[in-house]
Amino acid sequence: MSRIIVVANQKGGVGKTTTVANLGAALTALDKRVLLIDLDPQAALTATFGIDPYKLTHTMASVLLRSSMPFSRILHPVGANGKIALAPGGIDLAAAEVHLATKEDRTRRLQQVLEKNRVPFDIILIDTPPSLGLLTLNGLVAADEVLVPVQSHFLAMRGVRALMETIWRVKRRLNPDLRLLGLLPTMVEPNSRHATEVVEELRTVFKSKVFDVLIIHSVKFAEAPVANQTVVDSAPNHEGAVAYRKLAEEIANHG
């Protein structure tokens, strides 16, 4: 059985895609077989690994809309060592979300895809769009756990409450096995009093559910995808890469 982790936050620019890509790369170093699923119509995760979503014939939209489409048909080997498989996203996911809205099983399409295809991976990481719409709901319903990146800014933290309410609603009505894996402070400005206060507030409210790992703000995270790589692969000694390796170890050891 694969362990399925959805990375979600309705706010954009908090590090969801960066977390999925770098955490995936760090997990392969622990001999985990990793599948990354891009549910975002913007397809930033897909582009991170050098795949042009506009040139793809089939994306996640294909398998969400067509039950006869084999999941393996859309997978691409990616990463520095080719040990990661990517199920790419694309702009067609926006149209797929509209189309799915009329279906009775609209929130369970991804769950059905994964159950039907029984993919041979230890961990599946799902990247979601910056909204609490149908695509994000599909990720929450299909997952075992939710990882929430939270930008270390006061306004970003305020949106966490709405996400938590959505998570508990999904747990009550659609996926009783769903659990909160943890909140990950991201884009932390070193030596910033404001960032420190935000992280402290998160720990006060969510206690042990906030990871000890802090993801610092660094231009390296923006530069690495230019070379179709993650920071974990391109700059393994960088403090951001070290942080994601620590996060991977913590997640792998507490599965």
Image (cartoon, rainbow, N blue to C red):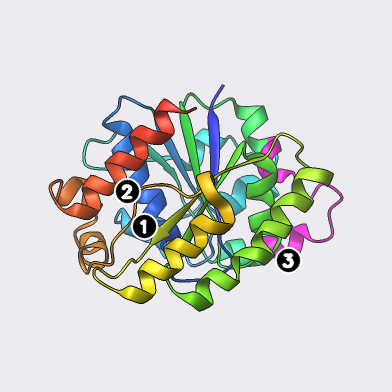
Q: Is residue 111 magenta?
A: yes
Mark 2 neighbour class, 10 Å CA radius: few under 14, some 14 to 19, many 20 or more? many
How many angstroms separate mark 3 from mark 2 (CA)? 30 Å
- Residue assigned mark 2: 22
Q: Quadrant of residue 151?
A: bottom left
Region in magenta? 96-112
Query: Does residue 29 appear left or right of residue 32 in this picture?
Result: left
In percent of the image, x 27 and y 48: which residue is there? 243
* x and y percentages locating residue 104 in the rendered image: 87, 50
Q: Quadrant of residue 112?
A: top right
- Residue assigned mark 1: 18
- Toward the viewer: 25 or 15? 15
* x and y percentages locating residue 253 in the rendered image: 41, 26
- Toward the viewer: 242 or 15? 242
Q: Amino acid at mark 2?
A: Asn
How many angstroms separate mark 2 from mark 1 (CA)? 6 Å
